[in-house]
Image (cartoon, rainbow, N blue to C red):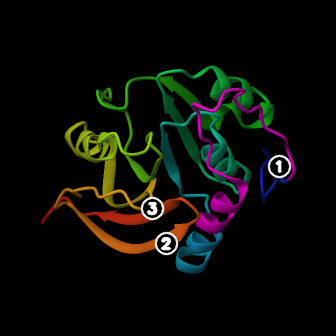
Amino acid sequence: MRIVAGKYRGKKLRTPEGKEVRPTSERAREAVFNILNSRFGSDYSDIRLADIFAGTGAFGLEAISRGAAAVVLVDKDTTLAAKNAKMFDKEQDKIKVLRADALNLPRMYAKFNMVYTDAPYAQGLTEEVLRQLIAKEWLAENALCIVEIRQDEHIDIPSEYDIIDERVYGLARLLFLEYKSEK
């Protein structure tokens, strides 16, 4: 697995050895960023991203490669994310690795205007994470939440989010949600 584009294009990332972890594919990451570029442009300098269930940290590190202002990689096991983040030695002031349970997020010092979450499929975790992001005040108004779920998975999206786009890539379905605190 490698970084697809930006300053660190081609940089190889460490990947898990077992099959219990399912990193977001390069193809899916590239597709998400193509959608973001067409919708919002390619300037990521104002993006403050939380990568929930970060695993390897690939999505967040891809955002760093493309110029994101700040990224927090959140996972219960941050071993791979931390190793991969260390390979971006010139970006250490922009990357934070946070060992935390996504179902019990800590309060944060700053709000995020973009969140990527890729919970284990079909375990009901995504809905709870979306509620946690609101309850723990992680989201800036109009924050974009990109949610990866299994293609045939049904989730109940909290009313504070509007679906603005939806795409299917292989077994994955990507939902693009916009957060509105005043609904």
Q: Which residue is mark 3?
A: 151
Task: Estimate the spatial distance between the alpha carbons at disc 3 and disc 2, rounded to whole Å.
Answer: 9 Å
Label 1 crowd (10 A; few <14 / some 14-19 / many >=20): some
User: Is residue 43 visible in this depiction of the protein?
Assistant: no
Q: Which mark is residue 8?
A: 1
Number of numbered labels in the structure image:
3
In reply to whether residue 42 is colored magenta, the answer given is no
Which residue carries the number 2 mark? Answer: 167
Q: In the displayed image of the protein, which residue is found farthest to the right?
A: 10
Q: Amino acid at mark 1?
A: Tyr
> Which residue does the image show at 32% across and 26% down from the upper left?
106
Residue at 84% in and 40% down: 12
Q: Is residue 86 visible?
A: yes
Q: Quadrant of the C terminus?
A: bottom left
Left or right, residue 149 beside residue 77: left
Confirm whether the magenta stretch covers residue 13: yes
Task: Identify the residue at horizontal 62%, vertical 65% (top origin).
Answer: 33
Q: Which residues are magenta?
A: 10-33
